[in-house]
Amino acid sequence: MREERGQLNGNQVIAEPVDLWGTISGNVTVLKGGKVYVRGAIYGHLNVEDGGRVHIYGNVSGNLTVEKGAKVILSGVLGGDAVNNGGRLYIDNMARVLGRLRKLEGDTQVDPHAHVHVSDH
């Protein structure tokens, strides 16, 4: 697994295992083969496509979009909306979603102790 501890600028596309301890200033797309642990921060949107896997321990300032076939666990802070378009999204008890949770399709589970505003649309 590749570790990133510095700062990456610009949009990133990830299709390999990455342990992010640093920051990314830009939007991030995780593709099939990408398994990302976000322990630092993403200053932008996070899109997880079919086959992508992400566990967020740190912060994402923008929106999170989970597509069909993707899996995401949110344990950190999401500054925007969490949108499930057909994947699997789990929001654990330590998570905070400052925007709205939109469960359009897929499997979304929210721990009752998580801080989330739910919208069905």
Image: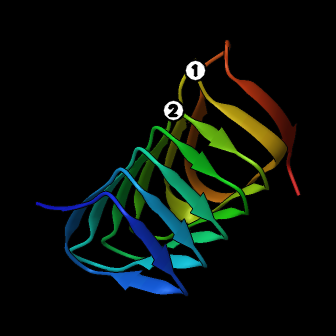
What is the quadrant of residue 105 in the picture? bottom right
User: Where 36 falls versus 78 (above or below)?
Assistant: below
Quadrant occupied by the N terminus:
bottom left
Disc 1 vs disc 2: Cβ atoms closer than 8 Å? yes
- SS under mark 2: loop
Q: Could you tell me the amino acid type at mark 1?
A: Met
Quadrant occupied by the C terminus:
bottom right
Residue 93 percent across, percent down from the top left: 57, 18
Query: Could you tell me which residue is drawn at 65 percent across and 70 percent down?
Result: 45
Q: Could you tell me the amino acid type at mark 2?
A: Ser
Residue 63 percent across, percent down from the top left: 72, 63
Task: Please name whichever residue, 2 or 70, is drawn nearer the observer in this view of the structure.
Answer: 2
Q: Is residue 113 left or right of residue 7?
A: right
Q: CA distance from mark 1 to mark 2?
A: 5 Å
Residue 29 percent across, percent down from the top left: 47, 79
What is the quadrant of residue 35 in the picture? bottom left
Q: Is residue 78 left or right of residue 38?
A: right
- Residue lying furthest front in this view? 6
User: Where 53 falls versus 107 (above or below)?
Assistant: below
Task: Please name whichever residue, 74 or 118, is drawn nearer the observer in this view of the structure.
Answer: 74
Task: Residue under label 2, please give it.
Answer: 75
Query: Could you tell me which residue is drawn at 36 percent across and 50 percent down?
Result: 21
User: Where 63 falls versus 114 (above or below)?
Assistant: below
Task: Please name whichever residue, 77 or 110, is drawn nearer the observer in this view of the structure.
Answer: 77
The 10 Å Cα crowd at callout 1, few under 14, some 14 to 19, many 20 or more, is some
Q: Is residue 70 left or right of residue 85?
A: left
Task: Residue under label 1, please give it.
Answer: 94
What is the quadrant of residue 83 in the picture? bottom right
Residue 40 percent across, percent down from the top left: 46, 48
User: Where 109 falls versus 84 (above or below)?
Assistant: above
